[in-house]
Image (cartoon, rainbow, N blue to C red):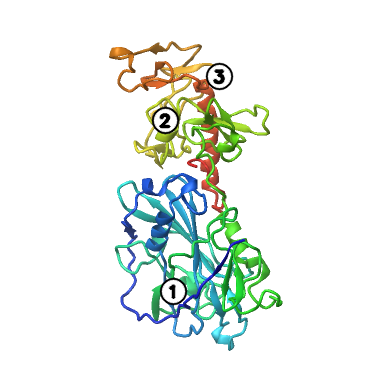
Amino acid sequence: MITVRTSCAVIAATAALTASPSLARAGTDIGVRWVDCVVEPALDADLDGLDDACEEAVVLGFEPELVFGVEETKPARVPFWAARRDGPETMRLFYALSYIDDAGDPDLNGATSHDGDSEFIVLRVQYDGAGVWTLVEGYLSAHYQTFCDTADWIPATSFQWESDVGGRPLVFVAEGKHANYADLATCDSGGCFQDHCTDTTREPAGIVAGRDLGLRTTPIIDDFVKNGNSEWYWTNEIFCGWQRPAADPRDGCVPADNSYSIQLDDFAMDDGPAAGVGLCEACVDDTDCKDGGRCFDARCTRACESDGCPGGSFCAPDPGFGSGQCEPETTCECIAACMGRECGDPGCGASCGTCPMNELCSAAGQCVPKDPGCVPQCDGKQCGDDGCGNVCGNCPNPEDCQNGVCVDDPTTVATTGAGGEAGAGGEGGGGDVVEDEGCRCATAGSAPRSQGAWGLALAGAVFLARRRRSERYASPTADR
């Protein structure tokens, strides 16, 4: 447990209303690229593989603008935050607003008031590859896990914005109760029709440097002390807004099933240290490899079950270590080439994943909606591309697909350039360079290609299914 003792300025609503909301879907250049964010876990405080300065820049770039009503009397809060990967070039941001008090329903003379209020906001943001980050969707707590819970995931197009440029969405706060909404009308019909919002004052949520919660397995902040009292974020304790000593009863505060610890779990913010980054990394023994990986031939593998391996690798059956191991399908360079891609061939004979039936893989390796007028062309084909972004079938191991037909032991042709070096498109050194369906790759020590492709197809299908579940809480692993 890490205890942080610091003086903590309480934030109060003082900003005046300046402009009407904008309906534009905002994007913003916050000065960092995805490539700047991905680091070796040992180089960042919570070991999640995301650079600390990048996390902070993204969290601040999308810091929600809170809209308070005229009857809000308890806006004081001490916000904290957490960030983690959430798919290719995507982050999940958790804003723990940490209100000191809940003032209760103003129409009922403050009934249902209590010490502390553990409201929160979750945003999913994505880098577009060209300098701009955009909001994908958000989750706004509103009486979370109670009978009057009206929270849900909200698409970016349903938010309003302070201006038409920038990444910060407006969040309308119910007077007295701090439930969060994307607009005034939703607020007035939310929370069993008890909530009410007005657009009187607006101010940033209050995110500052140094309040990164980290991860449960590697916390940066858990026990935070203010005015001599503690509040916990990863430890499951009822949140009372720093108004009760640890030894005092915590009944009458935030309900026990609504602590920040439970919320962080519910939204998979405790994903643990980055998994799989040790795959292909140099090693001396197993202690150099992460996430249950083993050291084979001075290179790390990574523990897996039936899915979850990075693009360019597949989950080999359990070799006697209690789990399968991710192994490169062709070369470790293929795995690096799949970073930031959801699907497709990265140009080295591997696959970065497959798309669902209603989507196809773009040239940038992203799953995009399919042309509804596309007609699959599979007549006379056992396998291969159907012309609409899917395949006509898969070949059994060890057969391979050539020109739409499954064949045994396909011919491969070793090629070299002048002086014995690999020709254009090949890999110099470390094994033969072969030509395989127009892609030239080093293959020494690699698994059979059809087995790897099948493992990756299964991994991609499971990953995409999880990512599209309505709850959206599954912990994505395809690019980790």
Q: Which comes before the other along the chain, label 1 or label 2? A: 1
Could you tell me residue 340's position as x and y percent?
Answer: 41, 41
Which numbered disc, 1 or 3, marks the residue closer to the eye? Answer: 3
56 or 90: nearer the viewer? 56
Amino acid of disc 1: Leu
Residue pointed to by mark 2: 333
**Does dot 1 land on a helix, a strand or a loop?**
helix
Which image quadrant is residue 379 in? top left
Q: Residue furthest left?
A: 418
Q: Which residue is mark 1?
A: 184
Q: Amino acid at mark 3?
A: Asn
Tell me where residue 394 appears, x and y as whole percent: 51, 24
Judged left or right of residue 358, residue 438 is left
Query: Where the N terminus falls, by quadrant?
Result: bottom right
Q: Position of residue 276 (x, y in %)?
A: 53, 39
Which of discs 1 and 2 lies nearer the camera? The answer is 2
